[in-house]
Image (cartoon, grey):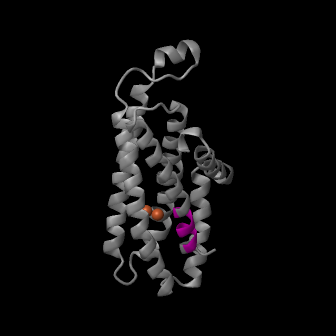
Amino acid sequence: MNSTENLLQEHLIVRRLASIAKRCSDVLYMNQDIPIEDIQIISVVIEEFVDGFHHGKEEKAYFPVTKYKNSFSEDIRKFLIEHEFARRIAKMLRRELESLIDHDLYNKTRELKWINKSKEPVARFLKSYSIFVFDHTGKEDIFFKKILEKHTLSEEEDLQLVKHYELCRNQTGGRTRIEEMIKLVAYLEDREWMK
Ligand SMILES: [Fe+2]
Ligand SMILES: [Fe+2]
């Protein structure tokens, strides 16, 4: 798989996570309960897999190499702004989630329970994140396919990028951690509230 196809493939996993976030948001809006642990998992996968690993690869490896080719710099500038926007949503989601957890009870019983407070902000940030993902990866897919069609990257550049991806993976927890993230996506898809 070349460096561009690699990112296209990863978008499939990112969009699976976005569908989970959307479903989770819908269920919370219906005022039904979802285990807090599950939403914590969504938040961790967003931060580690999407923001850290996937966007990291684009920002540190792929975009710096493609930026000076054709007239791609404007597209890339927009993608980077969108990544920052997404990180802000992820941070707000985490903060809201934290504020909903009854930490006193957890310290005493090790049991995670919601405190009696509106779940609306968590639902809203989950929804925003899923909208971001579908919009952003859709635009990037068009961009990546253009690069593939035009053979923008040389073989040498492509090899370098694939190597650089490995470095990015090691910086974000290594192969095992990334595989674990993908398993967590499958785990969430299998939860009762997803059906
Ligand atoms: Fe991106
Ligand atoms: Fe992407």
Closer to the camera, 159 or 126? 126
Quadrant of the snapshot with the C terminus: top right
Q: Identify whether 135 is placed above or below 127.
A: below
- At 57% from the left and 14% from the top, the residue drawn is 109
Q: Mark yes or no: residue 52 visible.
A: no
Q: Mark yes or no: residue 103 visible.
A: yes
- At 53% from the left and 46% from the top, the residue drawn is 45
Residue segment shown in magenta: 5-11
Residue 141 locus on image (x, y percent):
45, 71
Horizontally, is 57 left or right of 78 in the view? Answer: right
- At 51% from the left and 31% from the top, the residue drawn is 36
Residue 76 locus on image (x, y percent):
36, 69
Closer to the camera, 4 or 59? 4
Q: Identify whether 49 is placed above or below 76.
A: above
Residue 10 among those drawn in magenta:
yes
Residue 168 locus on image (x, y percent):
56, 58
| Snapshot quadrant of residue 191 | top right
Residue 185 among those drawn in magenta:
no
Does the magenta stretch mainly form a helix, a strand or a loop? helix
Quadrant of the snapshot with the N terminus: bottom right
Residue 146 locus on image (x, y percent):
44, 81
Assign ligand 1 to one image quadrant.
bottom left
- At 58% from the left and 18% from the top, the residue drawn is 110
Residue at the far right: name it: 176
Closer to the camera, 22 or 149? 22
Residue at the far bottom: name it: 150
Q: Tally the marks.
A: 0
| Snapshot quadrant of residue 93 | top left
